[in-house]
Image (cartoon, rainbow, N blue to C red):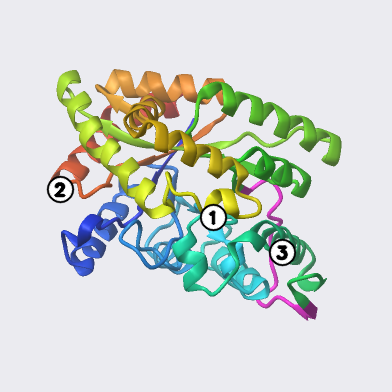
């Protein structure tokens, strides 16, 4: 199994300076290659303390120059917030600069504050994403972008530097809703799974995705990449207490950023699944937090190994990405968490 780590740069309630957050998150991310991780990831978000990586490709380009071996993954580039041809150019550029180590993750976004900040109608996000993905993915294979769409009218222009390697088999998309999973299957790309709903729902959507992928593309879908929040500690009781504090704390930051429990999803085209999630949040936020904890990775090293193995086996995945620093966790604790996992859990998973 391949094991990755992700840096997300959270600053809940502005408890620290952003400069302090960045200095420490960059330091932790710099440990990925020396400690033996297979991949390093980050995620795009804007305008709030939820995560502060507004340009994930810039973040990863920095690490392309600081590393030799580790793969670099975007989790995700939110295409509706970008000019697609510019995104295609930047993706080609980082792939050249990293020697082909880039894993492309894309998505459509769900934060109202971000769509408002970019002066975009959130209800158009699904259609914008499909058009942008068609242009970007087609351009990365052909070497030029061209589209006559509803939202994007792009005359034929070359991508320079020209893409050197195919992105087929190393492009993934975050899919939270069943509708998104269907779109990704038809686009012929893999799925990035961040567990946040009951396992039976995840199982059903993966089965649907795989069926549509085969019907559309004539081959089996690539194995998904999974991402999860990790708290590893030698003491099971302490691990549980801190999982409640920090992983539960992360879920609270996500709930605030996405406004889970709000009513705007029900009024926004393409976010029907999120509307149902918000309704569940209104009924029982405490139950939602406990359910989220059950989907993540916490416990002693042997417990963490077992949780990841069972999750990967369930989804038929061979790549699991871990988040070790989140929700305002002290950096000494984040680094202890990271190093314990890297020393006692990761080698066993990587061996098979």
The residue that mark 1 highlights is: 101
Q: CA distance from mark 2 to mark 3?
A: 41 Å
For marks 1 and 3, give the one nearer the viewer.
Answer: 3
The CA distance from mark 1 to mark 3 is 15 Å
Which secondary structure lies at badge 2?
loop
95 versus 231 height, above or below: below
Residue carrying label 2: 330
What crowding class fits label 3: few (fewer than 14 Cα within 10 Å), some (14-19), or many (20 or more)? Answer: many
Examine the structure image and report whether residue 170 is included in the region drawn in magenta: yes
Range of residues picked out in magenta: 154-172
- Does 101 sit left or right of 43 as displayed? right
- Residue 274 location (% of width, % of height): 54, 44
Magenta part, dominant SS? loop
Point out the tag, 2 or 3, that comes first from the N-terminus.
3
Instruction: Please report the residue visible at 47 percent of the width from the left and 72 percent of the height from the top.
Output: 117
The residue at the point 28 percent across, 36 percent down is 248
User: Left of 300 or right of it: where is 163?
Assistant: right
Give the secondary structure at mark 1: loop
- In the rendered structure, are the residues bearing label 1 and label 2 in contact, judged by CB atoms less than 8 Å apart? no
- In the image, taking residue 158 as reference, residue 11 lies left or right, namely left
Can you identify the residue that label 3 sits on? 140
- Indicate which label's residue lies in the foreground, 2 or 3: 2
């Amino acid at each position: 199994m391949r094991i990755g780590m992700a840096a997300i740069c959270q600053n809940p309630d502005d408890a620290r300076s952003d400069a302090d957050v960045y200095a420490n998150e960059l330091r932790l991310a710099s440990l990925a290659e020396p400690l033996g991780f297979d991949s390093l990831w980050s995620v795009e978000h804007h305008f709030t303390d939820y995560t502060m990586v507004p340009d994930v490709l810039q973040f990863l380009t920095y690490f392309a120059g600081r590393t030799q071996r580790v793969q670099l993954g975007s989790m995700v580039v939110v295409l509706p917030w970008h000019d697609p041809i510019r995104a295609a150019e930047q993706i080609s550029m980082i792939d050249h600069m990293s020697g082909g180590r880039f894993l492309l993750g894309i998505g459509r976004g769900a934060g109202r504050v971000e769509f408002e900040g970019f002066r975009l109608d959130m209800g158009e996000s699904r259609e914008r994403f499909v058009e942008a993905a068609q242009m970007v993915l087609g351009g990365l294979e052909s070497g030029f972008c061209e589209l006559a769409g509803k939202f994007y009218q792009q005359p034929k222009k070359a991508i320079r530097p020209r893409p050197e390697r195919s992105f087929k088999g190393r492009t993934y998309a975050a899919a939270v809703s069943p509708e998104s999973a269907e779109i990704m299957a038809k686009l012929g790309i893999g799925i990035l799974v961040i567990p946040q709903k009951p396992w039976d729902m995840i199982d059903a959507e993966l089965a649907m995705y795989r069926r549509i992928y085969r019907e559309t593309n004539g081959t089996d879908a690539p194995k998904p990449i999974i991402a999860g929040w990790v708290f590893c500690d030698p003491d099971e009781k302490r691990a549980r207490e801190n999982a409640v504090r920090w992983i539960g704390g992360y879920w609270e930051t996500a709930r605030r950023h996405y406004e889970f429990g709000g009513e705007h999803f029900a009024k926004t085209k393409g976010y029907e699944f999120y509307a149902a999630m918000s309704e569940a949040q209104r009924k029982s936020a405490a139950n939602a937090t406990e359910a989220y904890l059950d989907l993540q990775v916490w416990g002693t090293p042997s417990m963490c190994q077992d949780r990841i193995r069972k999750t990967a086996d369930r989804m038929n995945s061979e790549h699991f990405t871990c988040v070790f620093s989140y929700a305002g966790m002290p950096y000494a604790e984040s680094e202890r968490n990271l190093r314990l996992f890297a020393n006692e859990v990761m080698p066993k998973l990587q061996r098979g």
